[in-house]
Image (cartoon, helix red, strand yellow):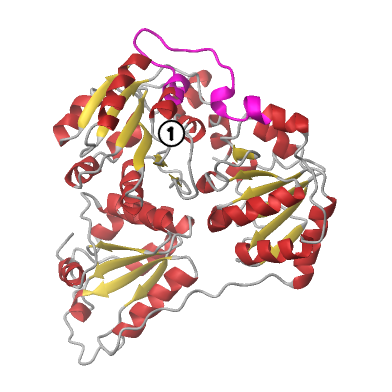
Amino acid sequence: MGSGNLAVTNALVAAGVPFVAARHEGGAATMADAYARTSGRPALLTVHQGCGLTNAMTGIAEAAKSRTPLLVLAADVAGAAVGSNFRIDQDSLVRSVGAVPERVHSAASASADVTRAFRTAVHQRRTVVLNLPLDVQGEEIADPGPARRLPPAPRAAPEPDLADALADLLRHAERPVFLAGRGALPYGRELAALADHTGALMTSSAVAAGTFADEAYDLGICGGFATPLAAELVRDADLLVAWGCSLTMWTTRHGRLVGPQTRVVQVDDDPLALGARQAVDLGVLGDVGLTVAAVAERLAASPVTTGYRRPDVAERLASGGRWPQVPYTDLSTPHTIDPRTLSTRLDAILPVHRQLAVDSGNFMGYPAGYLTVPAPGAFCFTQAFQSIGLGLATAIGAALAAPDRVPVLGTGDGGFLMGVAELETAVRLGLGLLVVVYDDAGYGAEIHHFGPAGADLSTVRFPDTDLAALARGFGAEGVTVRAVGDLAAVETWLAGPRDRPLVVDAKIADDGGSWWLQEAFRGH
């Protein structure tokens, strides 16, 4: 909140719009982003002019890069206030991070301006910043007219010849793999049925984790977080079909998960996405759901094929298809716990109905790989911009969108402290949020990437901090974990009223650099 958006926010609250006050604009932006991703509905963010908007820009950039339908109501200085200390070029700032700047120009155009901005956010899946100049905010609207409901966004069906081509490729594929992206999240069941018919294995990008939850032939997350077996099977595919997936360098490991004999198909309703990041043999422009239906119709008369679902593949997946099944040497010490041991035990303790969020850092593959995602939308991953510090706000926004699930956050000590102001928000809201801090007392990614080369690491190491005590100071519960037995406190908290967050300060053992870290630094 700020002076520039107080009147607008109060008017929205008076009209019945739910409002959540964050402690920092950056936290508010990421909460709104996470809420929209998890709920499937557009969210509103409101900020003060100038510094309120600049404080929110990292979260807005993340939402824009992720094509989150988000409408930002940003106050702006009055046109005549040339000397205002809040004056910046808000349109250029917004445009520079990939969001769409819009503006309410006058009382007469206000309805059309707001409708245009909202339509862009929803129909084009864009993050839109609607600037509200203070002098225009003060104008009177004589007759606002009737409220208008925005019609649903049009869905594009694939061209018949492209649907024919994809169906033909699936008929003849011996080792097909379906790769689901965020655009496929609503169509997991339909995709799984098509995979059953064609003998395809299934995997997803990180943001779409859980699309194929409970499916026997789900390989889990593709890319940097993939298990060795999943990476091998994807690389050996003769056909890879990307459904609503942008095929980023993270998802394909810079193309190394696409085998030399693999034919790649990409299905997307954005023509600019087709082949933008990975060369494709066939690009299908169309809505994922309509394309799945069109292809399934063409294959209905074709026999069900075994495809990639051979007995040897099924056996290997059953015995080693998940990270907890991959053997490792426990690195725990008398004072620290191996992050794999920690994550495996947490997965066993937590209830099935959970809502997961992950911050960024050296630790991030452990919650992403070891904690089971129970359903589509139950994993919120705000990492298109690769910023640390978004985790706590992400978890709060996702928790508000999915109140029937136990919210769980995996974060590092660096990211947790960077966004710790929002712990007060979680306490104030009475959220039963489990915050697991993978605490290595430093910026682990930099330590493990630059340390072997002899770099000075004093700038990225910090004194051990009692984060559990810090959490209790905010009004949350806190516990320090150095061994598996210490996790009994989590079980006690889960059995209780869960009317406040629990922060687990897990002092983790040095892993020498996590398995996905080298992949992350390839993109720098």
Location of residue 156 (image quadrant):
bottom right
Q: Which residue is mark 1?
A: 361
Occupied quadrant, residue 446: top left
444 lies above or below 206: above
Work out whether residue 47 or residue 91 is closer to the camera in this orientation and state it.
Answer: 47
In the image, residue 428 above or below residue 276: above
Q: What is the span of residues highlighted in magenta in the rendered image?
A: 317-344
Image quadrant in which the C terminus is located: top right
Residue 411, compared with residue 190, is above or below; it is: above
Q: Nearer the viewer, residue 78 or 159?
A: 159
Q: Nearer the viewer, residue 131 or 33?
A: 33
Would you say 147 lies left or right of 317 here?
A: left
- Residue type at tag 1: Gly
Q: Provide residue 271's location: percent of width, then percent of height.
A: 64, 67
294 relative to 182 in the view: left or right: right
Q: Is residue 242 visible?
A: yes
